[in-house]
């Protein structure tokens, strides 16, 4: 059976990472055929100590930035399929089997549908929209599976992007007509919306997408992001 490498970038995720790692180990269908790689970007809390307490988890460090961290994890991965997952996103039970089945159907990249852990009507609607196969409904919180061969062929994540790296890579996959939305639900945290307010946060995210469509550089995007969505410690909240 082919192997699945789960790659999780972290930065100050002490409050969340143990729950995610337990979830993955308890909800995969074939634990003997997965590896979990956590790539930390220099956390200043107890993230690394918590990760190292899980003997079945590989821990590595890389320069801070999801593209940098996820590329570093991909280089370490021994699996034929890579599965990139945010530290506050929880895939469905038997997520690995669903991914294997799609790859066997020659769907070499894709994600799950996504719902927020919130009852706010807009976030519920936003989650429902992820069931649509259109690129506008995609994002990194939904996770991403991709064969290692395909990932390498498109150059991995563009490390010029300190944010928006997921959308950049997904755009390349849609151009290749290689993206499948698996009709199962992943649950992700609405913590950023709870921190800033749903409408303010949504406005910031829409602004980032619009700026990129109008040609904004990766540097301009991260400057806007840091101004509006990052706290004084440099943590996205």
Image (spheres, rainbow, N blue to C red):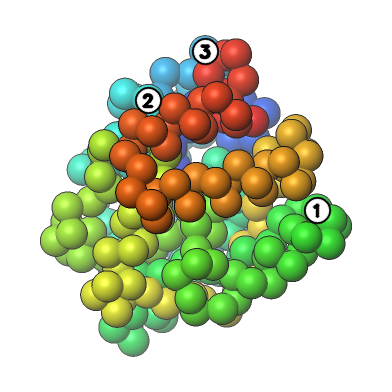
Distance from the alpha carbon under mark 1 to that under mark 2 = 29 Å
Q: Residues within 10 Å of mark 3 (few under 14, many from 20)?
A: few
Tell which residue pokes out farthest to the bottom in this image: 105
Please give the residue where the numbered disc 2 appears in the rendered image: 64
The C terminus: image quadrant: top right
Q: Which mark is residue 118?
A: 1
Q: Residue at x 84, y 56 (%)?
A: 120
Tell which residue pokes out farthest to the front in this image: 214
Seen in the picture, residue 33 relative to 11 is either above or below; the reply is below
Q: Residue at x 44, y 27 (%)?
A: 223
Q: Quadrant of residue 66?
A: top left
- Whether tag 1 and tag 2 are in contact, CB under 8 A, the answer is no
Seen in the picture, residue 79 relative to 66 is either above or below; the reply is below
Seen in the picture, residue 51 relative to 168 is either above or below; the reply is above
Give the mark nearer the N terminus: 3 vs 1: 3
Please give the residue where the numbered disc 3 appears in the rendered image: 44
Seen in the picture, residue 10 relative to 177 is either above or below; the reply is above
Q: Which mark is residue 7?
A: none
């Amino acid at each position: 059976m082919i192997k699945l490498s789960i790659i999780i970038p972290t930065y100050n995720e002490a409050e969340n990472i143990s729950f995610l790692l337990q979830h993955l180990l308890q909800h995969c269908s074939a634990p003997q055929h997965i590896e979990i790689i956590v790539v930390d970007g220099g956390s200043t809390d107890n993230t690394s100590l918590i990760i190292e307490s899980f003997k079945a988890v590989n821990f590595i460090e890389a320069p801070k930035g999801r593209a940098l961290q996820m590329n570093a994890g991909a280089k370490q991965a021994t699996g034929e399929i890579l599965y990139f997952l945010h530290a506050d996103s929880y895939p469905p039970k038997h997520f690995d089997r669903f991914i294997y089945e799609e790859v066997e159907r020659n769907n070499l990249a894709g994600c799950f549908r996504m719902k927020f852990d919130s009852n706010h009507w807009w976030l519920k609607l936003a989650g429902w929209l992820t069931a649509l196969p259109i690129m506008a409904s995609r994002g990194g919180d939904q996770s991403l599976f991709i064969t290692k061969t395909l990932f390498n062929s498109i150059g991995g994540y563009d490390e010029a992007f300190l944010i928006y790296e997921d959308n950049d890579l997904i755009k390349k996959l849609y151009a290749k007509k290689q993206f499948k939305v698996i009709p199962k639900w992943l649950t992700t945290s609405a913590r950023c919306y709870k921190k800033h307010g749903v409408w303010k946060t949504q406005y910031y995210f829409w602004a980032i997408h619009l700026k990129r469509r109008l040609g904004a550089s990766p540097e301009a995007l991260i400057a806007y992001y840091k101004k509006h969505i990052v706290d004084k410690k440099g943590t996205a909240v």
